[in-house]
Image: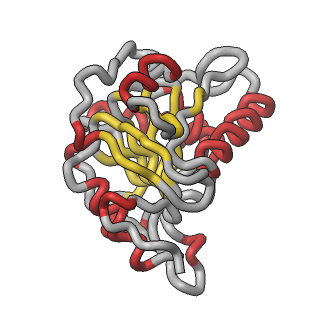
Amino acid sequence: MLQPAFANPVQESQRFFRVALEALSRPGHVVHADCAHGSPGHPAPLHPATAGLCLTLVDGGTPVCLDGASDADRDGVAGWLRFHCGCRIVDDPAAAAFAIITDPDHMPRLKRFCQGTLRDPHLAATLLIQVDALAGEQVAESNFMDAISKTNSLNDMSNKLDTTSDSDIVTLAGPGVDGSIRFAARGLPDWFWNDMAAQRTSYPQGVDIFLTAGATMAGLPRSVRLPDHGGAPCT
C-alpha cells in the first residue's frame, strides 16, 4: 500500500524547509525534524527525516538516484517518490540531482556523484544519507561523550552512541561553525570523512550532504572543513 505524505503539505513542507536550511547553515548541529502534526508517511527503509526532505526538496524536474535498498524496498520507495514528488528515478549517480542512500556501507564514493562545475557549482548533487545515530555539540572544555549524554537526544529508534568508536567522531570547522564543533555519526563507511575532506580541494565543486537518523538530521555542506583530516580552507 502506498504510504501517505504530509498531513498538511503546505505548512509542513515550509517547516521542513526551515529545518533543512538550519541544518545546512550550521554544519554538525543535530536538528529535530518532526512535523507539528506527526512525521510524514514513509515507505521502508526511509527514515522520517529522509522522507520529509524528499517531500520538501524534490519535485517533478528532479532526477533521483536510489542506492542500497533491496529490490522490493527500492520499488516501494521509487513508487512513493514518483507519486508524491513527481520525480524521475535514475540509475547513474552522476546523473542525479539528489541521491537517497539507505545503506551507506554500499554507497558509491563521493566523486561518483555530480560535482557541479566551476561555472555552475549549484548543479552538484545533494545526498541524503541514512545513518544509525547522530550527535553534535559545541566544544568547550567538557568531555564530548559527556556532552552527548547530557544535551543530545538522538533518534526515534533509541540508538545510543555509547558504542561509538573514535572513527565515528570528527571535528568540523568552516562557514557556519563558531570555532570548531565535535560531531558524531554512526554507520558511515570508513572512507567517508576522507572523501569529505578531499572534495575541499575542488571547492566550490563538491556535493552537499544531509545525514538523517530517525527524525533527526544534520547538514554537511561542501564548504565544511575537517581539520583532523587535512581539510584545507576555502579559496
Does 152 sit left or right of 5 as displayed?
A: left
Q: Quadrant of residue 115?
A: bottom left
Residue 139 placement (x, y as % from top left):
49, 40
Q: Quadrant of residue 109?
A: bottom left
Camera-nearest residue between 47 and 162: 162
In this picture, is 125 found above or below 37? below
Residue 232 placement (x, y as % from top left):
42, 72
- Residue at image point 68% right, 35% down: 16
- Residue at image point 71% right, 35% down: 13
Extreme residue in the right direction: 11
In this picture, is 2 found above or below 165? above
Camera-nearest residue between 159 and 64: 159
Residue 140 placement (x, y as % from top left):
50, 38
Does 93 sit left or right of 235 as displayed?
A: left
Q: Quadrant of residue 187?
A: top left
- Residue at image point 46% right, 36% down: 141
- Residue at image point 28% right, 54% down: 192
Does 21 sit left or right of 163 as displayed?
A: right
